Image (cartoon, rainbow, N blue to C red):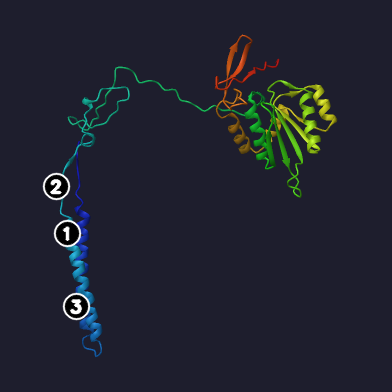
Amino acid sequence: MSYAAQAPSDRTMLGWKAMLWLAILFGVIGLYAIPQLLGGSSGTEPAVLMAQIVGGGAAVILGAYAAGLLVRGAPAPREEFDGMASLTELRLSEVPPTTHSAPTQFDEAGEGALDTVLSDEPLPVIPQVRPVQRSWTLDLLQSLEWRRFEQLCTSYYRAKDIQHVAIPLAANGGMDIYLFQDKERVRRATAVVHVRTRGPLATGVQGVRELLGVMSHERIERAFFMTNGVFTPEAKVLGHHHKIVLVDARVLLAMIQRLPEDQQAQLLEEATVGDFESPTCPICGSKMVHANGTHGDYWGCSSYPKCNWIAPIAPRAAA
């Protein structure tokens, strides 16, 4: 099947004819109509002269423009357009068949049938990749590595629209988030949140004592201890005695689930993008990998030997 290429003569034919009629119209009005109407009145000579000049000039200009369109719009020789062959100068017989071959050209011998090249091997079946559907659960919260969990805690206060400043502590030593909720003294911290990642493990009194030291040094009366694990009974007693709010994984999960659904989804996307379970090296920021040595399993920095930071693998809590 072939198609004939159209020359651009139809539009130009219409253009030069229109310009020719306008030239005739201006010439008749300026050189004949206006002089006939005003010629018998006294004092109209300047107007008649102006009409003749304008009408005659317009007629000459439009007539010349029409002639130019007529010359440029001469019909071009008609050429035949033969499908993809005229563009690529390739035939299917010149291309070795592969599993990616597809119809690319009309069959010249048939009634518009398409030539299809098929290989001897069947086309590969590509499985459809579906995004992993996650939701906020206790297991997911406890599986977050330390840096991702700290980012989640700061993002939570951002979602709550609470002014805060996050200060990382020593390597893998947690984070302190200072909250500023006093509208009159905006530069004064009203509470401190100590963040410590423990996964499913229990947090003892040592972390609570460290938080008490921060409260005393900064002269802050309100404090929260936030973890994705649990607290030992001794830590609960000490925290209750000093009015420290202990936020374990179950309480934090309930806090997140009370947020609007769009904010929950945003926090979930930030927390679970990429590898959110393998710990981050606190020295160089690279992801750590599971390794095995003479002393058993451990986390080793993926940038070794540039960085030789290692960390023990925390045992799973008993079910």
Badges 2 and 3: C-beta atoms under 8 Å apart?
A: no
Q: Residue furthest front?
A: 306
Label whose residue precedes the other's in the sequence (1 or 3): 3
Q: Residues within 10 Å of mark 2 (few under 14, many from 20)?
A: few
Q: Residue furthest left?
A: 77
Q: Which residue is mark 1?
A: 70
For residue 77, the mark is: 2
Q: Residue at x 83, y 33 (%)?
A: 243
Q: Which residue is mark 3?
A: 31
Seen in the picture, residue 51 relative to 227 is either above or below; the reply is below
Asked if residue 31 lies left or right of residue 309, the reply is left
Query: Residue 71: image x %, image y %?
Result: 15, 58
Label whose residue precedes the other's in the sequence (2 or 3): 3
Query: Residue 27: image x %, image y %?
Result: 19, 73
Q: Residues within 10 Å of mark 1 (few under 14, many from 20)?
A: some
Mark 1 vs mark 3, CA separation in Å:
25 Å
**Identity of the amino acid at label 2?**
Pro
Q: Residue at x 62, y 38 (%)?
A: 263
Locate the C terminus by quadrant: top right
Query: Residue 266: image x %, image y %?
Result: 60, 36
**What element does badge 1 sit on?**
helix
Q: Residue at x 76, y 38 (%)?
A: 191
**What element does badge 3 sit on?**
helix
Q: Residue at x 77, y 41 (%)?
A: 190
Q: Residues within 10 Å of mark 3 (few under 14, many from 20)?
A: many
Query: Residue 119: image x %, image y %?
Result: 29, 20
